[in-house]
Image (cartoon, rainbow, N blue to C red):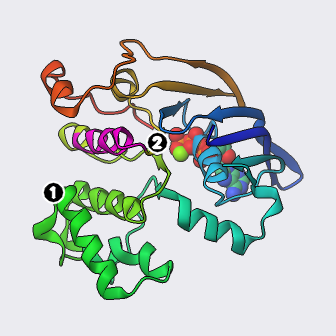
């Protein structure tokens, strides 16, 4: 077991009114698997991912990552743990506009204290893996939406995280690019990184992810394997042969 959610509750105060987003969510994520978190817009997927990544604290309950309990950590310790263990792909990519692609990708390593020249070298290797070796000196404004998202994925992978948390990584992309991104995440998962992803795209859920967690009214409703699930790990090449049609674009938000 890699990550455990224990009775997570999260509520916000909206004036006098209390808005409960997550109500007693418990779940164990196993190392090396891939997971989809689904549920209608506003149900709390991003809220849950933010808890998992330690970017936000639950109102009550706890997150335990490899036996380390988040509730025992200071903000600084939590940030350190996050930097060393997790990669996060946001709903919008959050690239730094004033830096080029390789500098953006190198940033987590520089923050972890690695020398800039070495970090840039690693960044270039990763950009190569996501098919952007010829774009490494472009700034975000000079890249397409899909290219920017690939830079964000490269950045999330650069420090070799144990776990990748992705919030609608294909949200704003065309169907072909969406599949490329998902294949990339699948490759990362095949190399042993746990992937937890929130998505509206049912095709992605059905074909690629091993476990689906449905949030409904703040509670975990079900936990099931999607249709067409195969226990056997498939390579991307095999997947491409069996999957001729690209995914339909995700539901409207
Ligand atoms: N800081 C906040 N203060 C008050 N309410 C918030 C805050 N952050 C989120 N919410 C509310 O919590 C609920 C869950 O939001 P969340 O972003 O987790 O939904 P989601 O499932 O990710 O939706 P989407 O599919 O649209 O991304 C929403 O009703 C939202 O308005
Ligand atoms: Mg969201």
Image position, residue 233 (x, y; %): 33, 25
Quadrant that contains the N terminus:
top right
Residue bearing the label numbered 1: 131
Name the spot of residue 38 as percent of width and height, x first. Answer: 52, 30
Q: Is residue 217 left or right of residue 191?
A: right
Residue 140 in view, yes or no:
no
Q: Reply above or below: 196 against 78.
A: above
Quadrant of the image containing the C terminus? top left
Looking at the image, residue 68 lies above or below residue 179:
below
Residue 195 circle label? 2
Residue at the outermost left position? 134
Q: Earlier in the sequence, mark 1 or mark 2?
A: 1
Is 230 included in the stretch rendered in magenta?
no
Q: Is residue 56 left or right of residue 103?
A: right
The one nearer the camera, 18 or 164, is 164
Choose top left, top right, bottom left or bottom right for residue 189. Answer: top left
User: Label 2's element?
Assistant: strand
**Left of 186 or right of it: where is 200?**
right
Q: Position of residue 243 (x, y in %)?
A: 18, 22
- In the image, residue 253 sits, relative to residue 203, either above or below, namely below
Could you say which quadrant of the image residue 133 lies in?
bottom left
Residue at horizontal 72 percent and vertical 40 percent from the top: 5
Q: Is residue 48 visible?
A: yes
Magenta range is 180-192
Report the side of 192 relative to 38 (left or right): left
């Amino acid at each position: 077991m890699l990550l455990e959610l224990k009775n997570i509750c999260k509520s916000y105060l909206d004036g006098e009114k209390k808005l409960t987003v997550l109500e007693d969510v418990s779940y164990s994520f196993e190392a090396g698997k891939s997971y989809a978190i689904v549920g209608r817009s506003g149900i709390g997927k991003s809220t849950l991912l933010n808890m998992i990544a330690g970017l936000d604290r639950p109102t009550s309950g706890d997150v335990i990552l490899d036996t380390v309990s988040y509730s025992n950590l200071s903000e600084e310790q939590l940030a350190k743990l996050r930097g060393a263990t997790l990669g996060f792909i946001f709903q919008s990519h959050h690239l730094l506009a004033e830096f080029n692609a390789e500098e953006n990708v190198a940033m987590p390593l520089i923050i972890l204290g690695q020398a800039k020249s070495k970090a840039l070298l690693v960044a270039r290797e990763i950009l190569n893996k996501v098919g952007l070796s010829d774009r490494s000196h472009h700034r975000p404004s000079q890249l397409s939406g899909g290219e920017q998202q690939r830079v964000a994925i490269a950045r999330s992978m650069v420090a070799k995280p144990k776990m990748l948390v992705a919030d609608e990584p294909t949200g704003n992309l065309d169907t072909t690019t969406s599949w490329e991104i998902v294949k990339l995440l699948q490759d990362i998962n095949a190399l042993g990184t746990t992937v937890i992803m929130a998505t509206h795209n049912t095709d992605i859920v059905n074909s690629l992810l091993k476990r689906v967690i449905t949030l409904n009214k703040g509670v975990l409703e079900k936990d099931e394997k999607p249709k067409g699930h195969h226990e056997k790990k498939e390579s991307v090449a095999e997947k491409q042969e069996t999957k001729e049609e690209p995914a339909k674009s995700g539901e409207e938000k």
